[in-house]
Amino acid sequence: METNLANHRVHVEALIARRLRPFAFAVVLSLSTACDRSAPVSDAAAEQEVNYLRAKKLYEQQDFPTAAEFYKKTLSVNPDFAKAHLELGLLSDDKLGDPIAAIYHYRRYLELRPDSEKRKLVEDFIERRRTFAARYTQELAKLGWLIPPAEPESCRHNFQSYMARLKKDAPISRDTLMQQLLDRGVSTRRGIMASHREAPYRDSPGSLELRETDAATDECIILPLFHQLKEEEQEFVLDSIREIGCTSGH
């Protein structure tokens, strides 16, 4: 009887071992992969990575959107590659008009290279945005029908973009303001794009009434703001807004 029980126990243990072997292998492989991912990569090695080299080549060919995609692939392999963050930040800012991505990559660069000789250059990119934002805020507040963004004393806005809001009694609608600015050569964007009002969801059954979201969607506008913006260009934007307000009866 004891021999039978012992044999049965050996059989069960062998069966369990066979069943668990694939899972044990998967755990070991997962841990090994995680360790490989966390291993630091030198800048010299990162600069020879195939996606990075491809990104540089595409930039030289002025295929900026595709270059950005290869920079992203580079950073997915090596997320701490500071040089790629800086170059993608500059590309996003200078060539793609994507200030949100630019600010993110600038900040990642500063986190990874706090003592870099380029630190002041990158900080100046960010500070220049704040200077232009302060100018917008000062002048728009004088108009009486555009609400500039608020910046609490305890916070510091990096102004990835500059969004203002038309008051309810504004002399012109947001869309008309955008069109008249465009007619003068000033490109702007809608500040809020509510998904429930976009084509795929607009007629969905059971959609809710979102009054505040709808109001913000209709009233917010993003004005031009980028670190290469010139003072005279910003003044032209402000003069255009003032003129549109005056001719619209305000």
Image (spheres, rainbow, N blue to C red):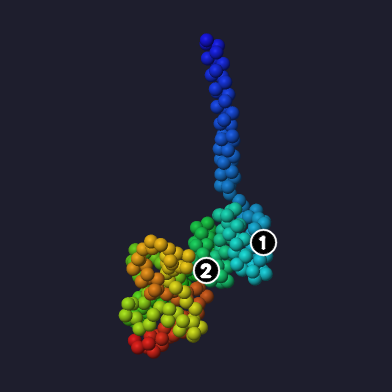
Q: Position of residue 114 (x, y in %)?
A: 51, 59
* Displayed quadrant of residue 147: bottom left
10 Å crowding of disc 1: few (<14), some (14-19), many (20+):
some
Q: Position of residue 115 (x, y in %)?
A: 52, 59
Kindly identify which numbered label has been placed on residue 175.
Answer: none
Q: Residue at x 57, y 71 (%)?
A: 95
Q: Residue at x 50, y 73 (%)?
A: 227
Residue 197 can be seen in this image: yes
Horizontal side of residue 186 vs 68, given as left or right: left
* Displayed quadrant of residue 221: bottom left
Q: Position of residue 22 (x, y in %)?
A: 59, 34
Q: Helix, strand or loop at disc 2? A: loop
10 Å crowding of disc 2: few (<14), some (14-19), many (20+):
some
Q: Residue at x 45, y 70 (%)?
A: 161
For the residues labelled 2 and 1, say whether their Cβ atoms are less than 8 Å apart. no
The residue identified by callout 2 is 98
The residue identified by callout 1 is 54
The type of residue carrying mark 2 is Asp
Horizontal side of residue 119 vs 193, given as left or right: right
Q: Is residue 234 above or below residue 101?
A: below
Sooner in the amino-acid sequence: mark 2 or mark 1: 1
The residue sitting at the top extreme is: 1
Horizontal side of residue 148 vs 42, given as left or right: left
Q: Quadrant of the C terminus?
A: bottom left
Residue 131 can be seen in this image: no
